[in-house]
């Protein structure tokens, strides 16, 4: 999900092993999904706070990869599809839980680009505790105005609109048309094309997304908004930044949101250009903590630094910035630009973005400040189950994907031992996998290739195992002996160790080795920026 504060929501005492038919339909590339490639959506919905309903349609454009006459569309109860048409002709369909299988009559020929219109309506699931509980929130602001938003990471966009609800496939672009009460405003993804006044006391806002977008990133935010705009001078030129906040929060928001261009400056330095210049950057006030909706980052942290005023790192540095602005915006690079192909690899989103907080601190307050921040986050690590989840069933790994994943990356930076090379790898990832959905092995492979290090065991240890690798050492008559323990068989990690006050690199294996020294070893201290344990077995 969108921040470290959801660690417990994703954690369990053991990796789940029993999954349902619905889990497979939601989390796998079924034959009814595999044959077609999304190219475009036009989501056109009416949001009615009077009866808490959403109704409308989604035009789905797709390219045929291989011939098939059965298509899977996803929409979760209590929402219901009422009609599906292609070329004006009504089609038959059957429902299997959250999946709807459409019987296509037109011959689906490879390379053809076709369209399907899906009409639907209903009272979507209400989110009781957003963003941890997915659904629509029908709230009121302090003035009694309707304040309506969606949150559905993990649960899927199909909670409230019909789509191909698997992260592997994204439309190349999307038009979002939202009808709402005329005294309010809707803020969605991309750029605002127009707002129409309707005869029935409503307005319709049309937002166009000019880039690929993941389903959970599509959002509606309807409220009594004030708006202002500024331009950030970025690596690719002028970046339009738009801010939408409740009217009575306008003045304090203008001051507090000065952190947004600071974030853009830091993250363009570390990760490369903001990935969505065509769509701009938005920060939108909502009645929940926040979420990384693409080009429409949502904010509800009470205009306070930290997370709800609290430093989650316990280092003191978390009090210097607003956690939600920095973390959720960091997802524009890792989650929205580079997106996991399967929910099991959500660490690609969360490990890098949790790590981005440390890089933000470093950019403005120095390297040691950033290191203190990320080391402090270790207090949240549970080591309860692997960071990588189970593939094909919409099941992410442990909430450790946040602090443990970030500390894995911080440890790796120490091994690379070249800050510019490390920054080049972070920027290179965003260039190599620009606007793509990726698998863990692609990210691991890129880092292995560009570091020139044998890191497969390293990734297996931190992503696929729950143990903390332990540097065991013994002092025997002044001789230092050492090895790795509590680790996977192929674990390899050079380690920076202070021996008698001098920095040394050692290369432990699972077998005992001896440190070559002309003097007796009296003191051994492992560099604290490595996320490893150390244990003195004996001192003789």
Image: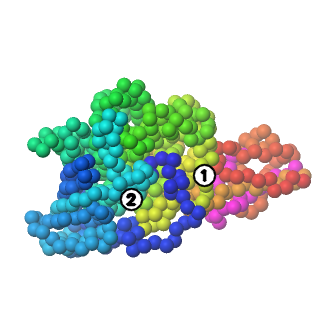
Which residue is drawn at the image coordinates 82% and 44% (left, top)? 523
Residue 98 image offset from top left, x and y in percent: 32, 67
User: Mark 2 — residue?
Assistant: 155
Q: Is residue 486 magenta?
A: yes
Local secondary structure at mark 1: loop
Local secondary structure at mark 2: loop
Q: How is the image coloured?
A: rainbow
Which residue is drawn at the image coordinates 49% and 42% (left, top)? 356
Nearer to me, 522 or 265: 265
Nearer to me, 379 or 503: 379
Q: Which mark is residue 43?
A: none
Q: Is residue 292 magenta?
A: no
Which residue is drawn at the image coordinates 40% and 33% (left, top)? 260
Residue 410 image offset from top left, x and y in percent: 58, 46
- The alpha-carbon separation of the residues under discs 2 and 1 comes to 24 Å
**Residue 371 visible:** no
**Residue 370 visible:** yes
Q: Which residues are magenta?
A: 478-497
Which residue is drawn at the image coordinates 9% and 64% (left, top)? 88
Quadrant of res 235: top left
Q: How many marks?
A: 2
Q: Residues within 10 Å of mark 2 (few under 14, many from 20)?
A: some
Q: Which mark is residue 381?
A: 1
Q: Residues within 10 Å of mark 1 (few under 14, many from 20)?
A: some
Residue 210 image offset from top left, x and y in percent: 25, 46
């Amino acid at each position: 999900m969108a921040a470290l504060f959801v660690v417990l929501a994703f954690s369990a005492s053991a990796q789940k092993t029993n999954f349902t038919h619905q889990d497979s339909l939601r989390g796998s590339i079924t034959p009814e999904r595999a044959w077609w490639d999304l190219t475009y959506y036009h989501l056109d919905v009416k949001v009615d706070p009077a009866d808490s309903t959403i109704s409308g349609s989604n035009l789905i454009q797709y390219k045929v990869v291989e011939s098939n006459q059965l298509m899977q569309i996803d929409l979760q109860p209590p929402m219901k599809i009422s009609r599906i048409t292609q070329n004006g002709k009504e089609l038959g369909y059957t429902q299997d839980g959250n999946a709807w299988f459409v019987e296509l009559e037109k011959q689906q020929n490879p390379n053809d680009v076709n369209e399907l219109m899906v009409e639907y309506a209903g009272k979507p699931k209400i989110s009781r505790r957003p963003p941890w509980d997915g659904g629509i929130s029908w709230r009121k602001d302090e003035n009694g105005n309707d304040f309506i938003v969606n949150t559905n990471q993990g649960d899927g966009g199909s909670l409230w609109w019909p789509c191909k609800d698997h992260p592997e496939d994204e439309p190349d672009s999307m038009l979002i048309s939202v009808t709402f009460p005329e005294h309010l405003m809707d803020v969605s993804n991309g750029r605002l094309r127009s707002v129409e006044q309707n005869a029935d006391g409503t307005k319709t806002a049309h937002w166009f997304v000019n880039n690929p977008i993941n389903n959970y990133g599509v959002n509606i935010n309807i409220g009594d908004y004030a708006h202002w705009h500024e331009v950030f001078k970025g690596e690719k030129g002028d970046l339009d930044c738009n801010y939408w906040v409740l009217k009575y929060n306008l003045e304090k928001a203008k001051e507090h949101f000065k952190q947004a261009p600071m974030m853009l400056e830091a993250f363009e330095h570390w990760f490369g250009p903001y990935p969505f210049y065509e769509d701009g950057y938005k920060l939108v006030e909502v009645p929940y903590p926040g979420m990384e909706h693409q080009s429409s980052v949502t904010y509800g942290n009470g205009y306070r630094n930290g997370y709800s005023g609290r430093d989650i790192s316990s280092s003191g540095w978390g009090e210097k910035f607003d956690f939600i602005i920095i973390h959720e915006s960091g997802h524009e690079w890792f989650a929205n630009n580079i997106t996991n192909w399967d929910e099991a690899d959500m660490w690609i989103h969360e490990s890098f973005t949790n790590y981005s907080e440390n890089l933000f601190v470093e950019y403005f307050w120095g390297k040691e400040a950033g290191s203190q921040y990320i080391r402090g986050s270790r207090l949240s690590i549970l080591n309860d189950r692997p960071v990588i989840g189970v593939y094909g069933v919409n099941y992410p790994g442990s909430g450790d994907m946040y602090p443990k994943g970030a500390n894995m990356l911080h440890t790796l930076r120490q091994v690379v031992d070249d800050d510019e090379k490390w920054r080049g790898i972070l920027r290179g990832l965003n260039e190599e996998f620009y606007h793509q959905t990726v698998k863990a092995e692609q990210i691991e492979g890129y880092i292995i290739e560009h570091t020139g290090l044998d890191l497969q065991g390293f990734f297996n240890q931190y992503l696929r195992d729950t143990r903390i690798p332990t540097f065991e050492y013994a002092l025997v008559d002044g001789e230092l002996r050492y090895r790795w323990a509590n680790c996977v068989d192929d674990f390899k990690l050079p380690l920076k160790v202070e021996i008698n006050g001098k920095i040394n690199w050692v290369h432990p294996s699972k077998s005992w080795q001896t440190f070559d020294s002309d003097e007796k070893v009296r003191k051994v201290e492992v560099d604290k920026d490595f996320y490893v344990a150390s244990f003195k077995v004996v001192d003789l």
